[in-house]
Amino acid sequence: MIGVIPAEVARAEDPRSKESTVSGDLATHELREEHELILEVLDLMAELASEDAGGFDASRLATHQPAFSEFLESFADRFHHAKEEALLFAHARPFLVHCNPIEQMLYEHALMRELRVAMDEAHRARDLAALTEACAELCQTLAQHIFKENHVLYPMVEQLLSDEARAALGEGYDEVRKRSGGPALRERFEAMRDALRDELG
Ligand SMILES: [Fe+2]
C-alpha cells in the first residue's frame, strides 16, 4: 500500500491556522476553514485505508466510500475547489507575475478528481485493494496540496491582492454561499465527520 501522510502534516506549523480572523487574510479565511474540515475527513479516510479489513464486505472503508465520495465531490470539489478556481485564483492571477503556483494547483485539483473517480470505480468493482490504494493516494495528495495552499499560495495572495480585488472576492464568496447553501452543506458533512469519529472511537 502507498504510505499515507497524515493530514496533520498539512497543518504543521501553519502560523495562520489559529489566527485567521485578522483583516489581512480575509481573502483566504473561509477557504482555510474549509481546509480544516477536509483534513479532518482525510484523517478518517486514511485511518480506514490503513485497516486490515479482511475482504470487501468486512471493509469499513468500502462501507463509507459512498459518503466519502459525496463529500469529495460536493464539498471539496464543487464547493471549495470551485470557489478557489472561479474566485481566488481568478482574482489572484493578475498579481502573480513571478513564481505563479496557480497552474500547479489546478493540475492537482484535476488529479484529485481522477483519484475520486478511481475510488468510485474500485468500489463499483468491489476491488478492495484498488479502493485502498486510491484512497491512500488521494489522502496523501490532497493533504500535500492543502499544505502548499496554506503555506505558499494563500500567503502570496494575501500579500498581493489589491483592496478592490479583496472586496470583489468577498462579494463572490457571499454569492456562492447563498447560491450553494454553504453553511448547510458544511453542517451536513460535519455531522458525517462526527458520526465517523464516534464509530472509530
Ligand atoms: Fe484548497
Image (cartoon, grey):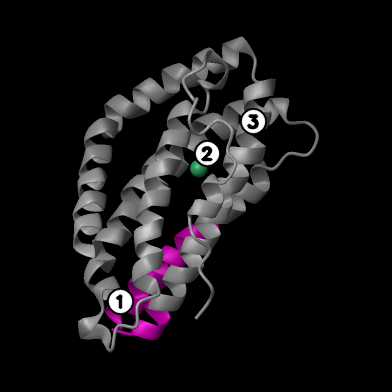
Asked if residue 109 can be seen in this view, the reply is no
**Which mark lies nearer to you, 3 or 2?**
3
Name the amino acid type tagged 2.
Glu
What's the CA distance linking mark 2 and mark 1? Answer: 29 Å
Q: Secondary structure at mark 3?
A: helix
In the rendered structure, which disc, 3 or 2, sits on the residue that comes first in sequence? 2
In the picture of the structure, the residue carrying the numbered disc 1 is: 123
The front one of 80 and 200 is: 200
Q: Are marks 3 and 1 in contact (CB under 8 Å)?
A: no
In the picture of the structure, the residue carrying the numbered disc 3 is: 155
In the picture of the structure, the residue carrying the numbered disc 2 is: 85
Name the amino acid type tagged 3.
Pro
Q: Secondary structure at mark 2?
A: helix
**Which mark lies nearer to you, 3 or 1?**
3
The residue segment tinted magenta is: 109-131
Among the 4 quarters of the image, the one containing residue 123: bottom left
Tell me if residue 11 comes above or below residue 45 in the rendering. above
Q: Main secondary structure of the magenta part?
A: helix
* Crowd class of label 2 (few under 14; some 14 to 19; many from 20; radius 10 Å): some
The front one of 102 and 153 is: 153
What's the CA distance linking mark 3 and mark 2? Answer: 17 Å
* Crowd class of label 1 (few under 14; some 14 to 19; many from 20; radius 10 Å): many
Tell me if residue 42 comes above or below residue 50 in the rendering. above
Q: Secondary structure at mark 1?
A: helix
In the rendered structure, which disc, 2 or 1, sits on the residue that comes first in sequence? 2
Q: Is residue 158 magenta?
A: no
Among the 4 quarters of the image, the one containing residue 37: top left
Report whether 104 appears left or right of 39.
right
Report whether 66 appears left or right of 84.
left
Which image quarter is the C terminus in?
bottom left
In the rendered structure, which disc, 3 or 1, sits on the residue that comes first in sequence? 1
